[in-house]
Amino acid sequence: MKPPEGAIVALLEGRHDDPFSLLGVHSGPTGVFARVWLPGADTAEAHALDGTALGTLPASTIAACSRVRSTARNSR
C-alpha cells in the first residue's frame, strides 16, 4: 500500500493537508501496518504494546525514502 509519490513529496515538504492519512497505523490487505517518517534514522524497530519486538525496517527502505526527499528538494 504505497501512497502516490506526490503525496510523499508533499509530506516531506510540509505541504500535505492530512499527514496522518499517510503516517501512523493503517489496515492493509494482509493486516495492520505502520508508516513513519524518521529523518536521520539508520533503522526503525516496531514493538507490540507488551514490548515484544515485531521487526526492523530495512536500511534499504530508509535509504529509498531519503532519495525521495532529496529529489523533492531538488525539484524546486
Image (cartoon, grey):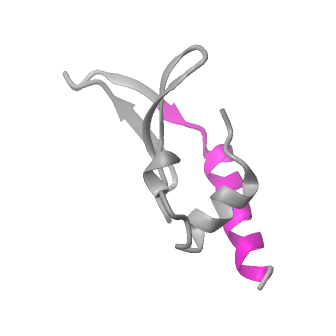
Q: Residue at x 65, y 57 (%)?
A: 7
Q: Position of residue 73 (x, y in %)?
A: 70, 79
Tag count:
0
State the quadrant of the C terminus: bottom right
- Residue placed furthest toward the bottom: 76
Name which quarter of the figure residue 28 lies in. Answer: top right
Above or below — where is 74 with respect to 53? Answer: below
Of all residues shown, which one is farthest toward the top? 30
Find out whether residue 2 is within the magenta segment: no
**Which of the 4 image quarters holds residue 1?**
top right
Residue sitting at x 39%, y 33%:
46
Q: Seen in the image, is 68 located left or right of residue 45?
A: right
Task: Decide which of 48, 21 is in the foreground and name it.
Answer: 21
Question: Residue, x 61% and y 51% (percent of image)?
Answer: 62
Picture coordinates of residue 37 (x, y %)? 49, 55
Span highlighted in magenta in the image: 56-74
Q: Residue at x 51, y 64 (%)?
A: 17
State whether residue 49 is above or below residue 39. above
User: In the displayed structure, does residue 19 sit left or right of residue 68?
Assistant: left
Image location of residue 23, percent across then percent down? 47, 47
Give the x, y percent position of residue 48.
29, 24
Residue nearer the viewer, 76 or 40: 76
Position of residue 2 relative to residue 22, above or below, is above
Classify 18 as above or below 71. Answer: above
49 displayed left or right of 23: left
Q: Main SS of the magenta segment? A: helix
Q: Judge from the rendering whether residue 47 lies leftward or rightward of residue 57; answer left or right.
A: left
